[in-house]
Image (cartoon, helix red, strand yellow):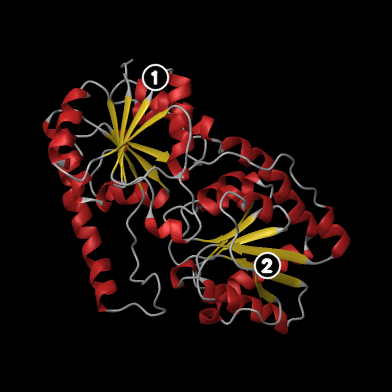
């Protein structure tokens, strides 16, 4: 078994998606995690109500804007015998430089990586433009070159979603260097809610939480709810998130826009509903699914949501084909009428929530770090059905 030493992470910003897992990694390993970041806070997320994540066990260092290249080179040399983990590398030219420099120094880093978006879709426009289509064409080509460069120079990739595993495998990264992974946040709800609401009220209360942007699939969700309204189904939808609700014809019939959820309160809000829906046209992961499962709430998501693997593994919800409003409407109608099915999914969230805690993720990472080269990919992932 190899000794990982200290853990050195490189990322644009330290967010909830990684911070709790890295803090738990420091606790379990008994060594500090040193995080080098290009920003202390993401401006886009700040506008959406996010706050700076503060956790113990992580020594966070802001890479200075002046002579940053030299600063990073010195830190890489200083920590060349430690374990390096790169996250969100493509978001910063400086981090790309650091990754290249690390391979030149024979550091053999690990990556935490989402898949690239395989569809031509704008985040905000309802129809993709020429630039969106060009990006979709170029991404597979760029990733093949990228994978060809890194595949022999890295220890492995903690791959966010089955799509990421498929993309890196297709690009030539060996299976023993691919580790099925995700994003992990802790439970903040103390007690899982009961299933009594569904049995007593005979109404399915559905919630969506996310930015009001096209790629989140809101058009599909609104169309599905209109279909259900025409069937006189007793299903209501509350929508929470930043953005302009007028772009998606909300606040009508069985749909209500409820504004933004204060940062850190998602689980508490979601716990009052029977079901969460995430109908994204593409979502590298979708942490709101973690939030729902931790709150004891099943999920319906599209087949293009990375965290859908949790739903399938733990049987805590359903998936439908992306953009298929009729398919989504049928899933919702089924759960509204077959209460035993919904109750079973609610019960399944207990096991799911226990399995997606940061301590489980950190334990898995440590097993990978300590495994001999060539056997790291054999460490079983707690979240994937293979």
Above or below, 66 against 75 in this view is below
Residue at the (31%, 20%) spot, across then down:
372
Above or below, 176 against 249 in this view is above
Whether residues under marks 1 and 2 lie with C-beta atoms below 8 angstroms apart, the answer is no
Q: Quarter-wise, where is residue 9 in the image?
A: top left
Residue at the (53%, 72%) spot, across then down:
218
On the image, the x and y values in percent for residue 224 come to 61, 76
Depth order, front residue of 97/330: 97
* Tag of residue 31: 1
In the rendered image, is residue 239 in sight? yes
Give the residue at the far front of this rendering. 66
Q: Secondary structure at mark 2?
A: helix
**Mark 2 — residue?**
332
On the image, the x and y values in percent for residue 155 come to 26, 31
* Tag of residue 369: none
Above or below, 194 against 206 in this view is above
Q: Secondary structure at mark 1?
A: loop
């Amino acid at each position: 078994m190899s000794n990982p030493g200290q853990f050195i992470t490189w990322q644009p910003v330290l967010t909830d998606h990684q911070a709790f897992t890295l803090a738990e990694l420091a606790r379990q390993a008994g060594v500090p995690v040193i995080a080098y970041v290009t920003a202390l806070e993401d401006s886009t997320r700040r506008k959406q109500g996010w706050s700076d994540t503060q956790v113990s066990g992580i020594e966070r260092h802001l890479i200075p804007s002046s002579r940053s290249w030299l600063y990073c080179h010195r830190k890489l040399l200083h920590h060349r015998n430690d374990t390096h983990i790169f996250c969100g590398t493509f978001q910063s030219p400086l981090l790309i430089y650091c990754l290249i420099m690390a391979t030149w120094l024979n550091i053999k880093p690990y990556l935490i990586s989402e898949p690239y978006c395989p569809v031509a879709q704008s985040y905000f426009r309802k129809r993709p433009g020429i630039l969106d289509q060009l990006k979709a064409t170029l991404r597979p080509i760029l990733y093949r070159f990228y994978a060809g460069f890194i595949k022999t120079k890295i220890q492995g990739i903690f791959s966010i979603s089955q799509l990421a595993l498929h993309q890196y495998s297709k690009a030539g990264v060996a299976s023993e260097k691919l580790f099925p992974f995700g994003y992990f946040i802790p439970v903040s709800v103390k007690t899982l809610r009961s299933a009594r609401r569904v049995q007593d009220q005979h109404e399915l209360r559905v919630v969506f939480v996310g930015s009001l942007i096209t790629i989140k699939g809101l058009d599909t969700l609104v169309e599905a709810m209109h279909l259900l309204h025409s069937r006189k189904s007793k299903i209501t939808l509350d929508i929470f998130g930043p953005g302009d609700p007028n772009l998606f014809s909300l606040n009508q019939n069985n749909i209500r826009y409820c504004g933004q959820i204060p940062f850190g309160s998602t689980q508490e809000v979601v716990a009052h509903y029977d079901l969460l829906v995430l109908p994204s046209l593409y979502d590298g992961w979708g942490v709101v699914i973690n939030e729902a499962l931790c709150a004891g709430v099943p999920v319906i998501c599209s087949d293009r949501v990375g965290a859908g693997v949790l739903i399938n593994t733990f049987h805590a919800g359903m998936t439908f084909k992306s953009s298929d409003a009729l398919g989504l409407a049928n899933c919702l109608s089924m759960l509204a009428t077959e209460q035993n099915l919904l109750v079973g999914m609610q019960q399944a969230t207990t096991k799911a929530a226990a399995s997606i805690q940061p301590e489980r993720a950190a334990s898995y990472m440590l097993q990978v770090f300590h495994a001999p080269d060539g056997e790291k990919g054999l460490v079983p992932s707690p979240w994937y059905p293979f």
